[in-house]
Image (cartoon, grey):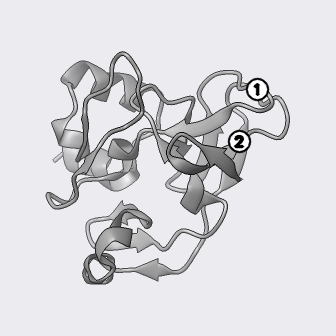
């Protein structure tokens, strides 16, 4: 982890090929009530079910959001490269691919030209972007399952 425009971030320590697993998110499993008890730190855990979150450990806790991500989460835990990532480049994923709780919102500061300004649930992002993320298989399984119902 290193300093970045958002505080601390995770940076590639080598060139990473598209599709390569960067690392696996780990940590204890907590519930929604515990995320809310954390106040400002509520965004640290990653939602993996309707009431199930990974209490993310380092380095995962330092991976920042981007509306134009170079990484995504597959299999609910594997952070993978969505394109080739150069050594020294910050690694970011779209937090909305992991959220469907109708609770958390955060102002986006990614600075990309396509910035949505607000980070929110998967259901709130544009339909075309939802389709793109679904085709890349970087949407949490509980969200995908909910779309099929």
Q: Is residue 97 visible?
A: yes
Q: Which residue is mark 1?
A: 17
Residue 65 lies in quadrant: top left
- At horizontal 29% and vertical 49% (from top left) the residue drawn is 143
**Looking at the image, is mark 1 or mark 2 earlier in the sequence?**
2
Find residue 114 and name its label: none
The picture places residue 1, in percent across and down from the top left corner, at: 71, 53
Q: Residues within 10 Å of mark 2 (few under 14, many from 20)?
A: many
Q: How many marks?
A: 2
Q: Label 2, secondary structure: give it.
A: strand
Q: Residues within 10 Å of mark 1 (few under 14, many from 20)?
A: some
Q: Gap in Å between the C-alphas at discs 1 and 2?
A: 14 Å
Q: Left or right: 97 with respect to 24?
A: left
Q: Which residue is mark 2?
A: 11
130 w.r.t. 142: above or below: above
The picture places residue 109, in percent across and down from the top left corner, at: 37, 37
- At horizontal 33% and vertical 79% (from top left) the residue drawn is 38
Pick whichever, 4 or 136, lies toward us.
Answer: 4
- At horizontal 20% and vertical 24% (from top left) the residue drawn is 127
């Amino acid at each position: 982890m290193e300093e970045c425009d958002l505080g601390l971030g995770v940076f590639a320590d080598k060139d990473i090929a598209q599709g390569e697993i960067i690392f696996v998110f780990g940590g204890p499993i907590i519930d929604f009530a515990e995320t809310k008890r954390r106040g400002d730190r509520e965004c640290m855990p990653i939602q993996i079910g309707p009431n199930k979150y990974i209490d993310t450990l380092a380095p995962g806790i330092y991976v920042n959001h981007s509306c134009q991500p170079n990484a995504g989460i597959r299999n609910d835990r594997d952070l993978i490269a969505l394109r080739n990532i150069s050594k020294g480049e910050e690694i970011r994923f779209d937090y909305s691919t992991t959220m469907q709780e109708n609770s958390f919102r955060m102002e986006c500061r990614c600075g990309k030209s396509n910035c949505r300004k607000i980070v929110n649930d998967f259901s709130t992002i544009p339909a075309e972007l939802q389709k793109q993320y679904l085709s890349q298989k970087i949407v949490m399984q509980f969200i995908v399952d909910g779309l099929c119902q």
